[in-house]
Image (spheres, grey):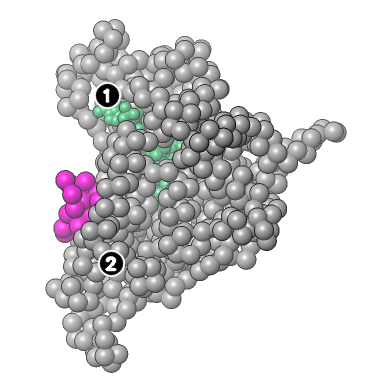
Amino acid sequence: MRTGSWQDWKKRSSKQGKVTMVKTVAVIGAGVSGLASIKCCLDEGLEPTCFERSDGIGGLWRFTESAEEGRASIYHSVFTNSCKEMMCFPDFPFPEEFPNYMHNSKLQEYIQLYAKHFNLVKYIKFKTLVSKIRKRPDYPVTGQWEVVIEKDGKVESVVFDAVMICSGHHVYPNIPKNSFPGIEKFKGRVFHSRDYKGPEKFKGKKVLVIGLGNSGCDIAVELSATASQVYLSSRSGSWVMSRVWDNGYPWDMVVISRFETFLKNTLPTAISDWLYVKQMNRWFKHENYGLMPLNRTSRKEPVFNDDLPSRIACGTVVVKPNVKEFRETSAIFQDGTAQEGLDYVIFATGYSFAYPFMEDESIIKCRNDQVTLYKSIVPPLLEKPTLAVIGLVQSLGAAIPTADLQARWAVRVFKGLCKLPPQSSMMDDIDEKMGKKLKWYGQSDTIQTDYVVYMDELASSIGVKPNIPVLFLTDPKLALQVYFGPCSPYQFRLSGPGKWDGARDAILTQWDRTLKATRTRAVKGDQNSFPLFSMLKILALPLLLLAIFMMFN
Ligand SMILES: Cc1cc2nc3c(=O)[nH]c(=O)nc-3n(C[C@H](O)[C@H](O)[C@H](O)COP(=O)(O)OP(=O)(O)OC[C@H]3O[C@@H](n4cnc5c(N)ncnc54)[C@H](O)[C@@H]3O)c2cc1C
Ligand SMILES: NC(=O)C1=CN([C@@H]2O[C@H](COP(=O)(O)OP(=O)(O)OC[C@H]3O[C@@H](n4cnc5c(N)ncnc54)[C@H](OP(=O)(O)O)[C@@H]3O)[C@@H](O)[C@H]2O)C=CC1
Ligand SMILES: NCCS(=O)O
């Protein structure tokens, strides 16, 4: 780590007679985004230094008994809602013996294996807080940043050529108390899901959980086994999916494919929406369980919870509308019903994004105090493209492969290998994407995005997007999997910069690893049906509708 100075820089630049390219990179955070960023810097010959405020890697996935300031906090029973073939680092499949969906401790084990395999820990400064990031005085020429770090009470300022912010976006709890009149009068315990760790202290209690997201549903289901009653209040409802999808295949290996994405973006909206609602209601009729989303065609992230419907059916979880107001021991709901004798209220109302270490936060929130980033990664108004935010997108896809591809793109922007368009074009692109977000997610300021579309956009810019027509000609067996099968992370390391020689084989064996994890008792005559064909049956209806649409257009 070089403590920089103007003299150092002048010496370096005078030697080469020109402004030096990016070499040293500060990576803020050692969660999966930070680890991917370290590796991508090394792959491109840069010198990363990662600062991690806690004493270990893994970020959100490193479980601790109590929440730590400035780091995401999870409850003990969190299981992934992305399966292993869809949430791995693209050049590092999960070990075969891992289950398809896993406990947070198993994912943390994998993260540690990844860091060890690529020898990343030596680039990390633990228990080192980044307290300030600011442009150097000569930033307009050098693009350099000053990173202020604090460790053991000592404060130090370090100069870097570039910065990758990997500090996570599930840290700062959103507790919308002003949306809930009377909450101050409520005599029971009130806290945010960030501080929830387990069901032990809720035995025999009456608990109201606010928020029908994954946290709210997980917590309501878990508490319903020991609390006397759990109420789950929702403002706008949500689609609920099971991890165990068609034919028992992992939901994301069936739903997240190039072909599904093509259908969603090609079929007339009315047909695409009709198919979506039909697909989402296939497991159970949501209106019969009080869960139906107000905007049923919104593609906002569903809840992945295998037990919620049965807990509702058993009466241990009662779904309620939004809360209108609180009284000393009760909640009054929007439908006028009231629930007396509440002991706890848990706000599972999500998180807000903040970058307290940015001296000028408007660099990231450059419009209406909203995060405004080109390709959800670089601030569009920076004079020099030497700062990137990694991990600030939410999609049906998994965070790890998303962060990996983002980091690969960002590093190539730092090196000038991926050129940014003029600022006006970047702002136009951001506006165009906001329009699409409004259409698909009902909000233009959301960080939600269409996974395959987003990944392909980055992949195209780097030069690693699979060329499907060519693949059908040169490697049809692989092409079938790549196009009709799951859009698994390996696809983005099949070719081009950062190619991984194991990618093709990983794709062709992904179903073997998936079925091996659950087909643990074989019965003679088991159909070893190749999932692709059973998946094509699932697509028969959309394919038929597409053919009819094409015939009449
Ligand atoms: C309950 C829950 C379950 C989830 N399940 C899934 C799932 O199944 N699949 C999926 O794909 N995603 C899931 N996610 C999304 C999750 O956020 C990502 O999987 C992933 O953990 C994000 O990693 P990250 O590195 O971007 O951020 P984080 O994991 O939050 O790591 C950020 C790191 O930065 C450090 N840091 C922050 N500020 C500073 C600073 N100023 N100085 C130094 N260090 C700093 C923190 O200590 C932390 O280690 C889940 C999220 C939650 C809340
Ligand atoms: N792997 C796993 O099992 C888990 C994954 N996660 C992930 O972590 C991330 C965060 O999830 P989560 O903590 O559930 O947060 P989310 O942001 O996903 O959900 C927040 C919920 O709170 C509601 N809400 C927000 N503000 C208000 C308000 N003012 N009044 C009433 N309701 C409000 C929202 O309702 P509305 O829809 O109306 O806005 C929404 O239902 C998500 O990406 C999630 O997928 C979380 C837990 C477990
Ligand atoms: N869809 C995977 C991301 S998440 O935050 O659960």
- Can residue 59 be seen in the rendering of this structure? no
Residue at position x 32%, y 78% from top? 21
The residue that label 1 is drawn on is: 189
What's the amino acid at mark 2? Answer: Pro
The range drawn in magenta is 355-372
Marks counted in the figure total 2
Residue 17, picture quadrant: bottom left
Secondary structure of residue under mark 2: loop
Image: 37 above or below 519:
below
User: Dividing the image into 4 quarters, which one contains the N terminus?
Assistant: bottom left
Residue 70 location, x and y as percent?
28, 49
Q: Quadrant of ligand 2?
A: top left
Residue at position x 35%, y 21% from top? 294
Q: Which mark is residue 385?
A: 2
Residue at position x 50%, y 42% from top? 261
Residue at position x 35%, y 68% from top? 419
State which tag comes first along the sequence, 2 or 1.
1
Front residue of 310/548: it is 548
3D distance between C-alphas at marks 2 and 1: 47 Å
Magenta-drawn stretch contains 369: yes
- Can residue 495 be seen in the rendering of this structure? yes
